[in-house]
Image: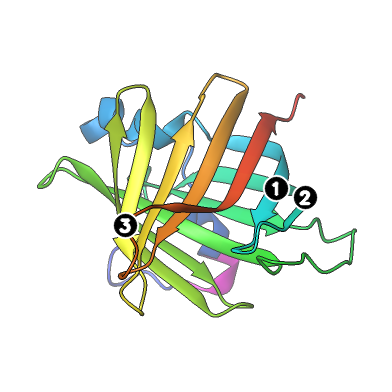
Amino acid sequence: MLISARQEIDMTDFKRLLHADGPNPEHTAALQLYGRFVGDWDAEITAHGADGAKHTAPGEIHFGWVLEGRAIQDVWIIPRPADGSAFPIAGNWYGTTLRVYDPTISAWRISWVDPGRCVFRQQIGRPRGEDIVQQGTTEAGDLTRWSFVEITADSFHWLGEIKPATATDWRLVADVRATRRKG
């Protein structure tokens, strides 16, 4: 739905203007790379410290179509709000990702924002075989690699890795096992 310059928009229209019912027909096939995740997910998150420490907590993830079906937006919440506890090692996550398919590069431009932790990431995402791999760089120059692997209709495994500028190997920082909510 396009809004003409003459129409007035107020905040009661915001949800209607942001959310979309499905993918935009212009790039339907390409949009399914992330579109298959649309819905609500329960998650188990494990944070991995550089010293080998691990901590696991439950969380939730919600994906939806936005911006005339030209993008996917998701919200990652760890731990669940009802939990009220702190998530050691990685800190609590309450952030959102905007994933926009860019046909000029045949890839996805990805922006992650977690205002509570002041974490902001820009990445490029592409399919790699049956997986999805997103790569970017932190403000400090470290490489990031976030991957969706073991993807089925009702589950996925997400890996968050970092490679410091001075390192030769990737280090697993967090992994998430998600299952689709039923009903």
SS at mark 2 in the image: strand
* Mark 2 vs 3: CB contact within 8 A: no
Q: Check disc 1: other Cα within 10 Å, few if <14, some if 14-19, many if 20+.
A: many
Q: Amino acid at mark 2?
A: Thr
* Mark 1 vs 2: CB contact within 8 A: yes
Whether residue 2 is visible here, answered yes or no, is: no
Relative to 59, is 132 above or below?
Answer: above
Q: Amino acid at mark 1?
A: Ile
Q: Which residues are magenta?
A: 9-13
In the rendered image, residue 123, in percent from the top left (x then y), is placed at 32, 58
Q: Amino acid at mark 3?
A: Thr
- Apparent side of residue 112 relative to residue 56 in the rendered image (left or right): left
Residue 11 lies within the magenta run: yes
Residue tagged 3: 168
Q: Earlier in the sequence, mark 1 or mark 2?
A: 1
Question: Which residue does the image show at 61% across and 77% down from the upper left?
Answer: 117
Relative to 15, is 151 above or below?
Answer: above
- Apparent side of residue 116 relative to residue 118 in the rendered image (left or right): right
If the image is split into quadrants, where does the C terminus sit?
Answer: top right
Q: Check disc 3: other Cα within 10 Å, few if <14, some if 14-19, many if 20+.
A: few
Residue tagged 2: 56
Q: Which mark is residue 45?
A: 1
Q: CA distance from mark 3 to mark 1?
A: 26 Å
